[in-house]
Amino acid sequence: MKAAVVRENNDGYVDLIDDWEPRSLAFGEALVDVEYVGICHTDLHVAAGDFGDPNKMGTQNGKFRRVIGHEGVGRVSKLGEGASDYLKLGDRVSIAWFYDACGVCDYCVSGNETFCRNARNSGYTVDGAMAQQCVVNAKYAVKVPEGLDPVQATSITCAGVTMYKSLKVGETKPGQWVSVHGAGGLGSLAVQYAHNVFGAHVAVIDGNDDKLEAARLNGAEVLVNRKKEDVVARVNELTGGVHNAQVTAVNDAAFSQAVNVLRPMGKLVAVALPQGDMSLNIAKTVLDGIEVRGSLVGTRADLKEAFQFGAEGKVTPIVEKVPFSEINSVIDEMKQGSITGRKVIDFTTL
Ligand SMILES: NC(=O)c1ccc[n+]([C@@H]2O[C@H](COP(=O)([O-])OP(=O)(O)OC[C@H]3O[C@@H](n4cnc5c(N)ncnc54)[C@H](O)[C@@H]3O)[C@@H](O)[C@H]2O)c1
Ligand SMILES: CCCCCCO
Ligand SMILES: [Zn+2]
Ligand SMILES: [Zn+2]
């Protein structure tokens, strides 16, 4: 079978192989025939070894080869022993970054399971969705609701749930101002969840006018092109300062800008993962009571909620189907910042 695996030289691209075979099913696992898989910027980080070499975390056919992908959707085609308590054949399920966890630690039992120290991650510490078949833990594979387009569901599986959760982490309330730094895969959905679900006003910042226009059409009222305007001055001038800033831009500078557009007692919610450290204006942080919070994807409950808003038409991911053979071209486009919404690999035509 076909699969996309991290290259052994971690050059940031993937090898497209056709000798992929999923592992045999352990107790409680199920096999999924993959339909569609979105490419998240995290896949680029993984392929480049930014979080450590994923090929050293698993084997395939005796070689170290990790399948990427964690914005996957597909249908259950085989149930391992014990899986039928949770899934049935034909169920459409998601394959998300949060693959599974221990289920018993303080984080798992308090609604914070994504922070479990034994959590496993699709396309990183376990083989991911970018293959014709993928193994899932039946207890953790969140079902895609009927009525939600499967191609759009891929974007909610990571980008959508991540921003839905991070808006919760930012304690977003109706009528407040939210700034979204980066209008890419995550940012484009942050705009929709913030405006359509949380009832907030949205200011969006990017360097690409097409993405800013897409954000305007999805409810953003303030658009700032970082390459043409002073981000901090414009956002403060037009919003009076935001209540929370959602940083999805893969760029250190965006974090400093985010701090400086917050009104007193504002919250910076860090989501993006550029390599390096965040530099905070100490005086601003202290004198304005600023909070900085990190946010990591979403729990199974968050994903179920995020899907439901999609099924109800409150959010509509911008997606474009792309053939499996073009994965590395999509990686190049994402590096150039030229993708509005998400490119989604189509396994149904293989
Ligand atoms: N914390 C989490 O749970 C989580 C989940 C998913 C993705 N991520 C991370 O979030 C980041 C974004 O992922 P994505 O798939 O949306 O990426 P993307 O490439 O689709 O979008 C990034 C956007 O940032 C814009 N940008 C770059 N520099 C900017 C700047 N200085 N100011 C404003 N915009 C800027 C780019 O033009 C692009 O539109 C990645 O680092 C990814 O690893 C984190
Ligand atoms: C450590 C990387 C976290 C990214 C979540 C899914 O994109
Ligand atoms: Zn992701
Ligand atoms: Zn746990």
Image (cartoon, helix red, strand yellow):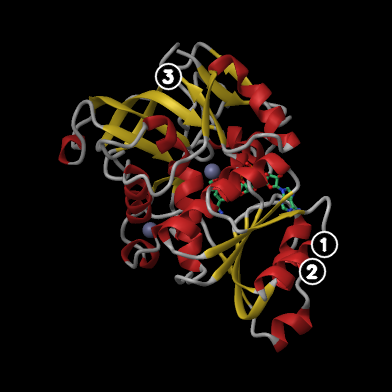
Mark positioned earlier in the residue sequence (1 or 3): 3
Q: Closer to the observer: label 3 or label 2?
A: 2
The vertical placement of 184 against 242, above or below, is above
Q: Which residue is pictured at 43% across the width and 54% down the height?
A: 298
> Can residue 150 be seen in this snapshot?
yes
As helix, strand or loop, the secondary structure at mark 3 comes to loop
Picture coordinates of residue 41 (x, y %)? 62, 40
* Number of numbered tags placed on the structure image: 3
- Distance of mark 3 from mark 2, alpha carbons? 48 Å
Q: Mark on residue 251?
A: none
Judge from the rendering whether residue 28 lies leftward or rightward of residue 34; answer left or right: left
Q: Quadrant of ligand 3?
A: top right
The vertical placement of 167 against 48, above or below, is below
> Can residue 117 be seen in this snapshot?
no
As helix, strand or loop, the secondary structure at mark 2 comes to helix
Q: Closer to the observer: label 1 or label 3?
A: 1
- Distance of mark 1 from mark 2, alpha carbons? 5 Å
Q: Are marks 1 and 2 in contact (CB under 8 Å)?
A: yes
Picture coordinates of residue 115 (x, y %)? 46, 60
Picture coordinates of residue 105 (x, y %)? 36, 63
Picture coordinates of residue 51 (x, y %)? 64, 46
Q: Quadrant of the C terminus?
A: top left
Where residue 229 sits, quadrant-wise, is bottom right
The amino acid type, in three-letter code, at marker 2 is: Ala
Judge from the rendering whether residue 37 lies leftward or rightward of residue 255; answer left or right: left
For this orientation, the residue located farthest to the bottom is: 287
Residue at numbered disc 2 = 233
Judge from the rendering whether residue 282 lies leftward or rightward of residue 273; answer left or right: right
Residue at numbered disc 3 = 132
Q: Mark on residue 230?
A: 1
Tell me the crowding category of disc 2: few under 14, some 14 to 19, or many 20 or more residues within 10 angstroms, Cα based: few
